[in-house]
Image (tube, rainbow, N blue to C red):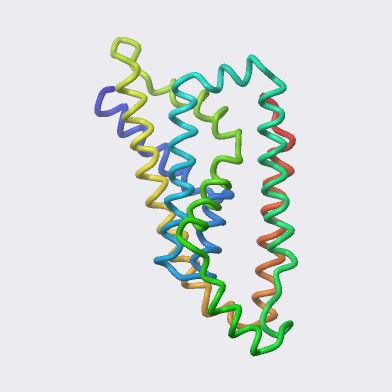
Amino acid sequence: MALHTWWMFVATVFFISASPGPNMLHVMTRSIEHGLMPSVMAMFGCFTAVVSLLAASAAGLTALLLAIPAAFTVLKLSGAAYLVWLGYKAWIAPVEDEIDPAEAELARAEAGPSRWRLFRTGFSIGVSNPKALLFAAAFLPLFLDPARPKGGQFAIMVATFGVVEFTWYFVYALGGRGLAAWLKRPARRRLFNRVTGGVFVAFGLAIAGTRP
């Protein structure tokens, strides 16, 4: 891969990753709820999922799924259902004025999920979007140099995509910390939960309508 081609790839990925999606929204909400450092495990979960999907696409998984439409449909509907369920959970999440103060204090003490749970949830959200496989299959080959070995070029692009994506996770997490103080009022937090839930449901419905 020529250096100027790589820079074009970096610039393109920069703007693609900046656009809000399930991963970015999840990282931001984890930062709001648990703080910047705990949200890093959610970032690693999403990051691992994205890199895994890109690598799988480069290895030919996308072609296999397209050759077996039923498999793609199962993957798509499973991912969509998971995002809709997350949206529902966010929509009904209680805020502090809806529960007893003693229970609220106990909930805060116990609410911090384990690192593994943060990672696992982030990974589940990241891997639940089969559109990433279709995107990788259509996007990565655009920057390939046919005169050079494909394996090394795919490795460079997957690694580059991962670094840029992870950088944007931090940006969204920092934005979440900025929102945390504003969301201390129960009414604002309730509104945020409803908006977040609605967005996750919208993402799920959009994935359900994806056609290979």
Give the residue displayed 43% in from the left and 65% down from the top: 38
On the image, which quarter does residue 169 sit in? bottom left
Q: Position of residue 159 (x, y in %)?
A: 34, 36
Q: Say which quarter of the image contains residue 1.
A: top left
Left or right: residue 144 versus residue 192 is left
Compared with residue 87, is residue 182 higher up or lower down, i.e. above or below?
A: below
- x and y percentages locating residue 48 in the rendered image: 44, 43
The spot of residue 208 in percent (x, y) is 73, 37
> Along the line of sight, which residue is nearer the eye, 46 or 14?
46
Q: Please indicate whether residue 7 sits to the left or right of residue 127 in the image.
A: left
In the rendered image, the residue lying farthest to the bottom is 101
* Front one among 19 and 67: 67
Horizontal side of residue 78 vs 22, given as left or right: right
> Residue pushed farthest left?
3
On-image quarter of the C terminus? top right
186 vs 48: above or below: below
Q: Which residue shows up at 55% across the image and 29% down it?
A: 133
Q: Whole-percent x and y of residue 95?
A: 68, 78
Asked if residue 206 lies left or right of residue 142, the reply is right
- Depth check: give the residue in front, 186 or 33: 33
Residue, x 49% and y 19% (percent of image)?
60
Tally the marks: 0
Q: Residue at x 44, y 23 (%)?
A: 58
